[in-house]
Image: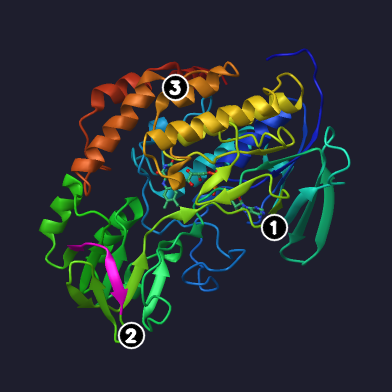
Amino acid sequence: MVSETNLSKNVCVIGAGPSGLVASRELRKEGHKVVVLEQNHDVGGQWLYDPKVEGEDPLGRNHFLEVHSSIYESLRLTSPREIMGFTDFPFSVKKGRDMRRFPSHRELLLYLKDFCESFRLREMIRFNTRVNYVGMLDYGVCHDDLKWIVRSKEKKTGKEVEEVFDAVVVATGHYSQPKLPSIKGMDSWKRKQMHSHIYRTPEPFRYETVVVVGNSLSGQDISIELVEVAKEVHISSRSLNISEGLSKVISKHENLHLHPQIDSLQEDGRVLFVDGSCIIADTILYCTGYSYAFPFLDTKGMVVVDDDRVGPLYEHTFPPSLAPSLTFIGIPRKLIGFPFFESQAIWIAQLLSGKRVLPSREEMLESIKEFYHSRDIAGIPKHNTHDIANFEYCDKYGDCIGFPRLEEWRKELCLSALRNSDVNLETYRDSWDDDELLQKALQSPHFTRLRVEDSAL
Ligand SMILES: Cc1cc2nc3c(=O)[nH]c(=O)nc-3n(C[C@H](O)[C@H](O)[C@H](O)COP(=O)(O)OP(=O)(O)OC[C@H]3O[C@@H](n4cnc5c(N)ncnc54)[C@H](O)[C@@H]3O)c2cc1C
């Protein structure tokens, strides 16, 4: 629903990754006063590569992690650059930089820095400031005019600050908190165990026998670079029904092997797999994904994380009892991230200014109930609640605020890259067969509009 009101609110955005950056831009555009609190020294979120991981627990069991980024040194994007940009800020090729379609993580950080410069976002950000607590002011007294206490700590000075905001936007990401399997003998295993969250380079594993648990994107990427230095790499996978691409890689390398799940870890270094096979390993590297975690957030139980379901959240963004004064950006997975974050940011900004209103609390709760039910019927486990994998969902979400639908070329390029990676795991970032589509994309207004504007300067 749209209304004529235009209120300006004091808004705190937590996190200066892609979600927090686009949120701050849209909130300010809508007339709000915005402060972004960022624990790191710069913008970028996951894309701010951090080689210093020594202080982190190898399995990430700390309540508050020391390291945010899980990006490893050699990482190149898994999605082609053309599909990644915000709607009005294409991720274009720049001379003298990494001009590849699937560039290194460093190029995406530069893109985000360019985005900040273009829209003067840095002036809203307080760096080296970690949020330790977010809770309701006068909880239980007045719900209509909810305000939030935000306590943060300035890293260098240790100074703690308490502030009150009309609204808080949580944009803290969800690829940092390691998710670990529960394996018999894991707690007493004496050799090295770590999660990919702190994996950076293959060198420390030279001549080792490494078991990589999990064969999703990181597991595959990391195994491919480990085989070059390690004595043996053993991938333990939940299913032996693997992609054509991974099969090809395994058959090419004599020291790369596939196993089913681990049954148990033995104190003498043996790793037993459920099919009865066994190896002696130096290191277990868990590439088993990440969990949602908001260690700073106290909502008195109104938003909880249960088996990786953050809820209840209407449209993965709005807690019915607390929105729009508390909202979340970037929760959904398996979608084209940046434009989706942008649509979330616009919706939140317009709700806070009173330009739009959410359905009633009851209607939102009903919608969430229906959504959960539809996922149950489809046999989708709770921990995959926020896996979208559906362009139509993004389009429908955007329709609620008149946000442009994903361009056809964006969808098609996304799918062709996925198909290519499935079949040609080792080469998909350097060779492809969707050039025709690519040309179509590069001639679309998303890219050409900017060139015209540039030449007019
Ligand atoms: C290995 C890996 C590969 C990936 N590859 C791709 C890819 O190819 N394409 C793609 O689209 N996506 C990829 N992603 C997903 C990536 O996370 C998103 O692209 C994007 O970074 C999400 O943005 P975000 O702002 O929501 O979260 P983040 O980028 O995680 O940013 C969150 C920010 O919040 C800050 N923060 C957290 N807690 C606090 C606190 N308490 N106080 C203050 N600040 C805090 C963090 O320091 C960080 O700056 C990849 C992720 C990983 C881990």
Say which residue label 1 marks.
Answer: 130
Say which residue label 2 marks.
Answer: 267
- Dot 1 beta carbon under 8 Å from ligand 1: yes
Q: CA distance from mark 2 to mark 1?
A: 39 Å
* Residue found at x 50% / y 49%: 308
Task: Tell me the crowding category of disc 1: few under 14, some 14 to 19, or many 20 or more residues within 10 angstroms, Cα based.
Answer: many
Name the foreground residue: 118 vs 186: 186
Name the foreground residue: 105 vs 261: 261
Location of residue 204 with respect to 8 vertically, above or below: below
| Mark number, residue 208 | none
Q: Earlier in the sequence, mark 3 or mark 1?
A: 1
Q: Earlier in the sequence, mark 2 or mark 1?
A: 1
Q: Nearer the viewer, mark 2 or mark 1?
A: 2
* Residue found at x 15% / y 58%: 250
* Residue found at x 32% / y 28%: 413
Q: CA distance from mark 3 to mark 1?
A: 34 Å
Name the foreground residue: 56 vs 59: 59
Q: Secondary structure at mark 3?
A: loop
Residue range corresponding to the magenta coloring? 258-265
* Residue found at x 48% / y 26%: 394
Figure coloring: rainbow
Q: Earlier in the sequence, mark 2 or mark 3?
A: 2
Task: Tell me the crowding category of disc 2: few under 14, some 14 to 19, or many 20 or more residues within 10 angstroms, Cα based.
Answer: some
Residue 249 coordinates in the image, percent (x, y): 16, 54
| Mark number, residue 406 | 3
Image quarter (top left, top right, bottom left or bottom right) of the N terminus: top right
